[in-house]
Image: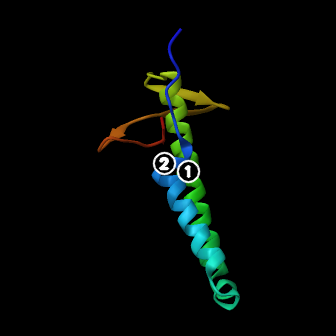
Amino acid sequence: MKTPHNFDLLTTTEMQALFTLLEQRFNAEVEESAKSQPEFERELRDHMLALERCIHTNDFRRLDVDVPGIVVEGARYRRPTVRNRVHRAVF
């Protein structure tokens, strides 16, 4: 049995970026927050997607998924490596 990989979600750059976004948002004036609501929603979505990708990447790394592709709910995915980053692509 392999030893589990250590993964500290709270120290990831994605989580830190989310914390920064939320801290800025909740420290902003109410009027400014109201005006910037659409932008905040887009930024929050982008940060959450980045965090989700980080979690999946580390979970697959923990599971030692080392295959050219996987099938999730009927959709096929592969992990091409580009500049030392893992991207999801349909194959």
Q: Residue furthest top?
A: 1
Q: Position of residue 76 (x, y in %)?
A: 55, 32
- Identify the secondary structure beneath mark 1: helix
Viewer-closest of 64 and 24: 24
Above or below for 47 versus 72: below
Residue 44 placement: quadrant:
bottom right
Mark seen at residue 12:
2
Mark seen at residue 68:
none
The residue located at (62%, 75%) in the rendering is: 25
CA distance for labels 1 and 2: 9 Å
Residue 68 placement: quadrant:
top left
Q: Residue furthest left?
A: 83
The residue located at (50%, 17%) in the rendering is: 3
Give the mark, 1 or 2, whose residue is nearer the N terminus.
Answer: 2
> Looking at the image, is mark 1 or mark 2 nearer the viewer?
2
**Crowding near the residue tagged with mark 2, few <14, some 14–19, many ≥20 C-alpha atoms within 10 Å:** some
Q: Position of residue 74 (x, y in %)?
A: 65, 31
Tag 1: amino acid: Leu
Position of 75 with respect to 91 (left or right) is: right
Instruction: Check disc 1 and report the residue beneath it.
Output: 51
Above or below for 63 versus 37: above
- Identify the secondary structure beneath mark 2: loop
* CB under 8 Å between discs 1 and 2: yes
